[in-house]
Amino acid sequence: MIHISTEFSILTKNLFCLAAKFLCAVQGQGESTHGCTNKNQKDYIVQDSSTLHPENVLRRKFVLSALVPAVVFPILSSDAKAKNINPYNEKRVLQQNRNIQKQNNVPDDFPNFIREGFEVKVIAPDDYVKRDSGLIYRDFEVGTGDCPKDGQQVTFHYVGYNESGRRIDSTYLQGSPAKIRMGNKALVPGFEEGIRDMKAGGKRRIIIPPDLGPPVGPSTFFSAKQFEVFDVELLSIQNCERRTIGFYSDVVCN
């Protein structure tokens, strides 16, 4: 340990001297003027009419010795290469999404999705409507009559897709429509919002953002937070009332 400390002290001293000599040579003043150490000066050094303590001189030499190599050999930042590379090519990602959707045989005017991590841009025709909640929809047929209210039962068909256009669920394939009462939180928030202002006989495409989407996990067919697309056909709206017979009670919808 003693030998290592001695060698390190000698090496540090030599670096100080080399740095000082280098600066003197650059300034063209020799070794004894204007801030360059002189062999005969041991106690103090004059620089711009100010007196510096030997410890300050040593500290200043250390700083200068650290700056000199940085000036002579500039360090190349690793960010320089990254700035010349565009990690996110929007046009390329859009084309990839379109190719995958084409393989999945998506319906006409299906929206495209450009995903960069958790950031997603939805590309859809101008006739799609976006609400403040983030929900996006398009009406293919408006339907007739009144819109469903809380407590009423809606009967509807739907086909669900993910961002790649892969079909994730369909009541048409199941052979029977879905029946749900409005207002009891039995539906995905975005889905209920999307059909709340539909009318019987209406057909609508609903694009549900992750914030309004279904829960994810192994117990569902949704494996990640992403946009979901539903083509919905609202068949009918029924009024419901509670029926009680003895100790038995249920809700009947006409």
Image (tube, rainbow, N blue to C red):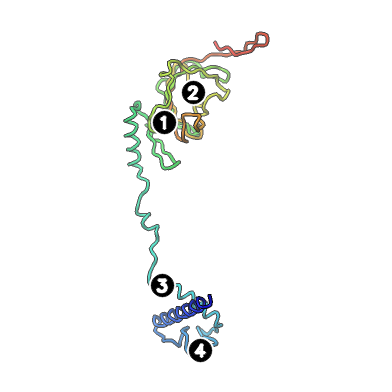
Residue type marked 1:
Asn
Give whichever of discs 3 and 4 has the lower sequence position.
4
Q: Nearer the viewer, mark 3 or mark 2?
A: 3
Q: Residue at x 38, y 63 (%)?
A: 76
CA distance separating discs 1 and 2: 19 Å
Which residue occupies the foreground of this view, 132 or 185? 185
Residue at label 2? 195
Callout 4 touching callout 2 (CB < 8 Å): no
The residue tagged 4 is 41
Q: Are marks 4 and 1 in contact (CB under 8 Å)?
A: no
Type of amino acid under label 4: Gln
The picture places residue 184, in percent across and down from the top left corner, at 58, 23
In the image, 122: left or right of 246? left
User: Residue 222 appears at what percent x and percent y?
Assistant: 47, 31
Tell me which residue sits at (38%, 30%) in the image: 165
Mark 1 or mark 2, whichever is nearer to me: 1
The residue nearer to you, when weighing 224 against 133, is 224
Calculate the distance from the C-alpha at mark 3 to the C-alpha at mark 4.
Answer: 26 Å
